[in-house]
Image: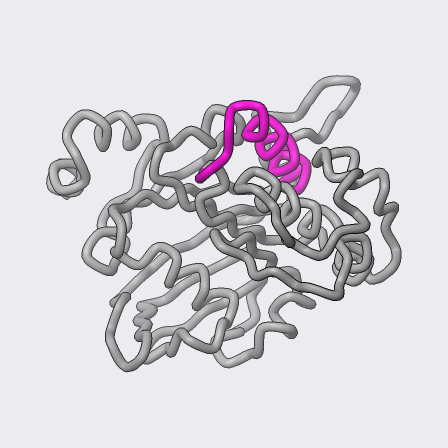
Amino acid sequence: MLKLEDLSVAVNDRPILHDVNLHIKPGEVHVLFGPNGTGKSTLIGAIMGFARYTIIAGRIYFKGQDITNLPVDERARLGLGIMIQRPPTLRGLTVREMVQICGNNQVDVDKLAGKTNMCTFLARGVNEGFSGGELKRSELLQLLAQQPDLVMLDEPESGVDIENIVVVGQAANSILERDLRKNGQTIKKYRTERQKSGLIITHTGHILDYVPADMAHVMYQGTVACSGNPMEMLSCIQEKGYEECVNCAV
């Protein structure tokens, strides 16, 4: 689904990431830990193709295609989706209109809004006056309409209360096909039944209580320093901190 090869990225001519290697298979959800300022948001912004991130070395492959130099809109059409931490306010465009655009006018907006508790927001401007939890639900509503093959979530639990994080978790699971059912039972164990993949940035790890991950990585000093079991790595980070966690893995 996604393959990064020796990816190095700069922002305003300042190197942020170096030699990042990552491989996410179809149906897998990976979680990315790391201290502030180490490049986690830069990584997903570069994968999405945002203009402020300059790729100075390496390649990005998505579904087997080299997308290193593709513009954002082409990456979105191929099936890349993202939820950023601080989405902009779009005055003059309603949430309903935005969801219709994301779904290419082929989605039931009201049904999707019901999944994210956004029915009463459909006539409002996109993100206009929204709280932290409402911003997350608005972004997830758009992703539900888009149905990307790879969804990247930047700190989905940040600024979200307990009630909202349940909705966020349920919506994320729906996008990632973690709520697929077969013979009346939810498919949790066999990722071969799923095709959607995810990359989730988290500081607290709270989102893992609602969205199970298959693999975890620690971004440290601008690169992926170690990888392993998500809950084991989270426990190590909470107990010993990032530096000790990385040293133990090495």
79 or 62, which is in the foreground?
Answer: 79
Q: Main secondary structure of the magenta part?
A: helix
Residue at 69% across, 64% down = 91
Instruction: Please give the name of the residue rendered at 61% of the width and 46% of the height, measured from the top-left corner.
Output: 130
Q: Quadrant of residue 226?
A: top left
For this orientation, the residue located farthest to the front is 129
Task: Indicate whether 93 appears above or below 241.
Answer: below
The part of the chain drawn in magenta is: 158-178
Residue 164: within the magenta? yes
Report x, y in % for residue 221.
19, 57
Residue 72 screen position, x and y as percent: 58, 73
Residue visible at 32% across and 43% down in the picture: 33
Count of numbered labels shown in the rendering: 0
- Looking at the figure, which quarter contains the C terminus? top left
Relative to residue 22, is residue 115 drawn left or right?
A: right
Of all residues, the one furthest to the top in this rendering is: 184
Q: Is residue 205 magenta?
A: no
Q: Who is closer to the viewer here, 109 or 236?
A: 109
User: Residue 202 location in percent, x, y?
Assistant: 39, 41
Residue 185: image location, x then y, percent: 72, 18
